[in-house]
Image (cartoon, helix red, strand yellow):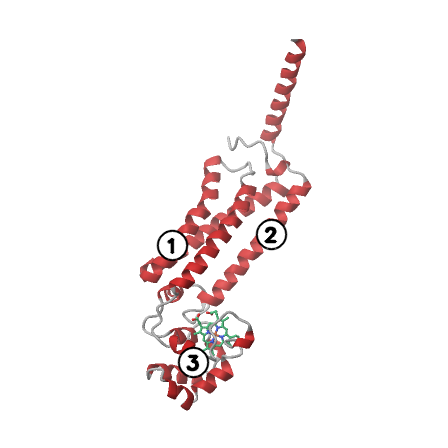
Amino acid sequence: MSTKNKMSLSRQDMALKSLFTGYLMVVAIGYMMALVQIQFTHGMADGEMGLSINDIVYSYYGKRSGSVIETKLNGSMKEMVSEQNRLKITNWIHKGANKNDYYDSGIHQIINENCIKCHGPASGMNIPDFTQFDLIVKRAETDTGASFASLARVSHIHLFGIAFIFMFVGLIFSLTTSVPIRLKATVIAMPYVFLVLDISSWWLTKLNPDFAWLTIIGGAAMAFSFCFMWIVSLYEMWFSSYSYREKSNDLLVNKNQVLSKNNECSL
Ligand code: HEC
């Protein structure tokens, strides 16, 4: 038997089904947006579109053969500046990122023309302000990946936010009747287990790049359980009619109620 739950998705009225469907649709769009965002921030870390193990290593462990600016200029900031100016910036970093050279050899001007529109106080974006030399020079040092402060910030947001999303997706899915109970419980628990694994893997990768594959496994398992719950829930709500088994269960319950009422009357 699949479930002891008396409530089932297919038996809900239009109102609750619409609420659940609206929620599932919006959460799915949110999920897709998150994947697009990952492509832009981490996916480009190695300079090529698409998420790879290298992207994860560069993002968390860093590209320790170079600086953050170089990693970014070969990655997500590649299109912001011409090849020639990119080389000039890299040369300046290799020569020791000297403050006088910064102003004398035209780096200041390159940054002003190409970067300040976003990396300036006026853009309102929450990214380093390159009108301050100190903030530039800090990123000319060896790239050690994500800082512990930023990991802590992103970790707690993801733990709270994603746990909340899976609370409701799981709750809706728990009312389905076509999936055997053990499989159902596993699929509901999976995102929580893999969320913790995924986030732990960022910290582990920061310490040791060999852990980067854990990030891929964690993310893939979460996406798999999300899709599974999403498809089964929507299918049962809109396409599977109130099943024969449920109907006969209901009839049985009604019959028992009638019988017990009769007993009360005859007493
Ligand atoms: C169109 C807006 C835009 C322009 C122009 C731009 N950036 Fe960025 N930059 C961003 C955004 C958004 C981020 C954060 C996301 C990311 O890391 O990809 C960022 C992040 C960075 C970082 C990582 C900062 C950190 O420590 O977190 C560096 C380094 C960087 N940019 C360098 C540059 C350089 C150098 C230029 C000019 C050649 C430049 N950017 C031009 C938008 C821009």
Is residue 191 left or right of 67 when viewed as pictured?
right
Ligand 1 has an atom within 8 Å of the beta carbon of the residue at disc 1: no
Q: Nearer the viewer, mark 3 or mark 2?
A: 3
Q: Nearer the viewer, residue 10 or 104?
A: 104
Instruction: Name the residue rendered at 47%, 82% in the picture.
Output: 111
Mark 3 or 1, closer to the camera:
3
Label 2 crowd (10 A; few <14 / some 14-19 / many >=20): few
Type of amino acid under label 3: Phe
Quarter of the image for the C terminus: give it.
top right
The quadrant in which residue 93 appears is: bottom left
What is the C-alpha distance between the residues marked 3 and 2?
Answer: 45 Å
Secondary structure at numbered mark 3: helix
> The disc labelled 1 sits on which kind of residue?
Ser
Q: Earlier in the sequence, mark 3 or mark 2?
A: 2
Question: Which label is found at residue 133?
Answer: 3
Of labels 2 and 1, the one closer to you: 1
